[in-house]
Image: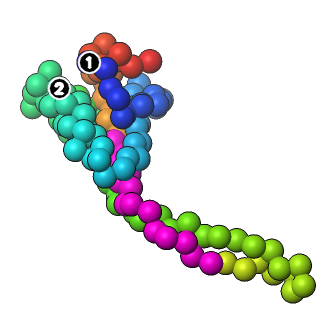
């Protein structure tokens, strides 16, 4: 199951718990597709490891953290005024809102291997 929006980085702690971290920032037109991709990953985890979700330090096989923010960016036009030696700032037209989503999913080596295989992760 290839992923279009989530590009995971992997790390592992000294106890062998692996963590996959991804961040995706999308325009309004891609929000539904991004949410569907996140739901696909989490549905897979729940289906393949049912009833095993929870903090690994409390006996869970896997766990996740999901966060999202929507921001409107306003470009700033900067100009150097050589007479005064200062920067002049003028706000431009705000752009469309961008949604930035982060997903961290961690688990045992068995869970991490299965996640890698299911989604073709490195």
Q: Which residue is mark 1?
A: 1
Placement of the N terminus among the 4 image quadrants: top left
Q: Which residues are magenta?
A: 90-103
Task: Between residue 82 and residue 67, name the one nearer to us.
Answer: 82
Residue 94 magenta: yes
Q: Residue at x 39, y 60 (%)?
A: 96
Q: Residues within 10 Å of mark 2 (few under 14, many from 20)?
A: some
Asked whether the viewer can see residue 63, the reply is: no
Where does the C terminus fall, quadrant-wise? top left
Q: Seen in the image, is 57 located left or right of residue 40? A: right
Residue 34, image quadrant: top left
Q: Count up the numbered dots.
A: 2
Q: Is residue 120 left or right of residue 1?
A: right
Q: Residue at position x 20%, y 37% from top?
A: 36
Tell which circle, 2 or 1, labels the residue nearer the N-terminal end. 1
Element type at mark 1: loop
When the figure is inspected, residue 117 is found, relative to residue 51, above or below; the finding is: above
Q: In the shown orientation, is residue 70 left or right of residue 10?
A: left
Quickly name the residue at label 2. 44
Q: Nearer the viewer, residue 35 or 20?
A: 35
Q: In the orientation shown, which residue stands out farthest toward the front?
A: 93
In percent of width and height, residue 42 lies at 20, 34
In percent of width and height, residue 98 lies at 38, 55
């Amino acid at each position: 199951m290839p992923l279009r929006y989530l590009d995971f980085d992997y790390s592992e702690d000294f106890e062998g718990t692996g963590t996959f971290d991804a961040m995706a920032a999308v325009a309004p037109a891609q929000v539904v597709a991004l949410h569907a991709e996140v739901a696909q990953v989490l549905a897979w985890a729940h289906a393949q490891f049912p009833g095993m979700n929870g903090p690994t330090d409390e006996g869970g096989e896997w766990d996740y953290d999901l966060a999202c923010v929507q921001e409107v960016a306003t470009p700033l036009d900067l100009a150097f005024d050589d007479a005064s030696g200062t920067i002049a700032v003028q706000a431009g037209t705000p752009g469309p809102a961008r949604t930035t989503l982060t997903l961290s999913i961690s688990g045992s080596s068995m869970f991490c291997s299965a996640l890698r295989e299911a989604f073709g992760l490195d």
